[in-house]
């Protein structure tokens, strides 16, 4: 059985789709909304931010401020309803606390036809991010059921499935088990990111509920000899943008992987790049070309 290669979103070339980006905002260090807004915009989307937290800088820095925006969000969305705001996609990422899962579920209820694009941002390298509590991680699991696209890395997949983190070098049997567990939990499709088998490449896997892990597609990208903060947000934003541009899910995942690799090559030439984050500005043309 092969993966269903029909597009998740049928793009009208004369229409600009609206996507709610439910992420935090960092003043310094490119990630979350400072990635989602320009990347989705480059892919021809009207980005409607829903800020889940305000940071002075991302959590890889030693010193940062954190402001939870939960209290303001109900009135924020009430105003959208009063103005008749319409949405074609809901793309969620980093959350400030467990209550914000309810905010996303409210969006799902009020915009039932919008695509649900879930990047379950919780951690990497086997560790959760500093502001993520066990309660928040448990609440994030509620977003799996019904997600049109769920895009975890291996750390996040282990949290969502309750399995032990096995590192990035996992075999096909482990990949299949993870994909099937997430699909059985209610995700309609999964993009599993960041498998590294120490062969100079990185692998991502795409699977759908219709085909299961047996019909998964493997996407292989050349691995660069360094890591950069923010690549996960850049990948998920490019993935969402390509989907909203009318590309199939495997195509979108491939586009996102190559976009991040191109951006990392630019990033390595920038000062303090490992902390500052991925520099994607000069390669946004890879996404604008999707909607010309």
Image (spheres, rainbow, N blue to C red):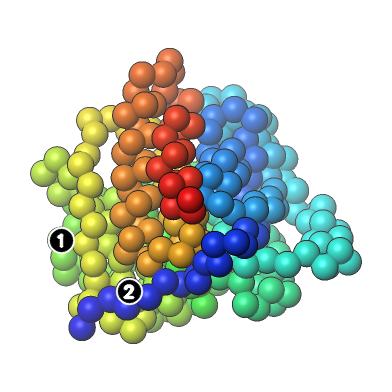
Circle 2 residues within 10 Å: few <14, some 14–19, many ≥20: few
Residue 181 shows up from this direction: no
Left-right relation of 32 to 224: right
Location of mark 2 (residue)? 5
Which residue does the image show at 61% across and 72% down from the upper left? 114
- Name the foreground residue: 95 vs 10: 10
Q: Nearer the viewer, mark 2 or mark 1?
A: 2
Q: Secondary structure at mark 2?
A: loop
Determine whether 150 is above or below 129 in the image: below
Mark before the other along the chain sequence, 2 or 1: 2
Q: In the rendered structure, are the residues bearing label 2 and label 1 in contact, judged by CB atoms less than 8 Å apart?
A: no
Q: Secondary structure at mark 1?
A: loop
Location of mark 1 (residue)? 171
Circle 1 residues within 10 Å: few <14, some 14–19, many ≥20: few
* Image position, residue 36 (x, y; %): 56, 46
* Image position, residue 139 (x, y; %): 57, 66
Left-right relation of 193 to 22: left
* Image position, residue 123 (x, y; %): 44, 48
Which residue sits furthest left?
A: 199
């Amino acid at each position: 059985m092969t993966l269903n290669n029909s597009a998740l979103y049928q793009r009208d070339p004369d229409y600009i789709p609206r996507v709610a980006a439910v992420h935090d905002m960092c003043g310094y260090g490119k990630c979350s909304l400072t990635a989602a807004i320009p990347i989705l915009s480059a892919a021809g989307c009207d980005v409607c931010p829903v800020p889940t937290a305000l940071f002075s800088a991302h959590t890889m820095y030693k010193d940062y401020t954190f402001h939870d925006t939960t209290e303001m969000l109900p009135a924020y969305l009430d105003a959208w309803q009063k103005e008749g705001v319409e949405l074609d996609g809901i793309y969620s990422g980093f959350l400030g606390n467990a209550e914000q899962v309810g905010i996303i579920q409210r969006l799902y209820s009020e915009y039932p036809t919008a695509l649900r694009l879930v990047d379950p941002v919780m951690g990497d390298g086997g560790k959760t991010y500093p502001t993520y509590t066990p309660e928040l991680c448990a609440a994030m699991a509620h977003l799996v059921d019904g997600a049109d696209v769920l895009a975890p890395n291996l750390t996040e997949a282990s949290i969502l499935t309750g399995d032990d983190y096995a590192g990035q070098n996992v075999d096909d049997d482990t990949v299949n088990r993870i994909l099937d567990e997430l699909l059985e939990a209610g995700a309609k499709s999964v993009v599993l990111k960041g498998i590294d088998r120490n062969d100079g490449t990185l692998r991502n896997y795409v699977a759908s509920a219709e085909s299961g892990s047996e019909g998964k597609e493997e996407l292989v990208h050349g691995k660069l000899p360094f890591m950069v903060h923010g690549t996960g947000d850049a990948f998920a934003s490019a993935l969402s943008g390509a989907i909203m541009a009318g590309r199939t899910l495997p195509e979108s995942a491939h586009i996102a992987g190559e976009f991040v690799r191109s951006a990392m090559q630019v990033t390595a030439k920038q000062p303090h790049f490992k902390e500052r984050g991925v520099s994607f500005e000069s390669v946004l043309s890879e996404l604008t070309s999707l909607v010309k």
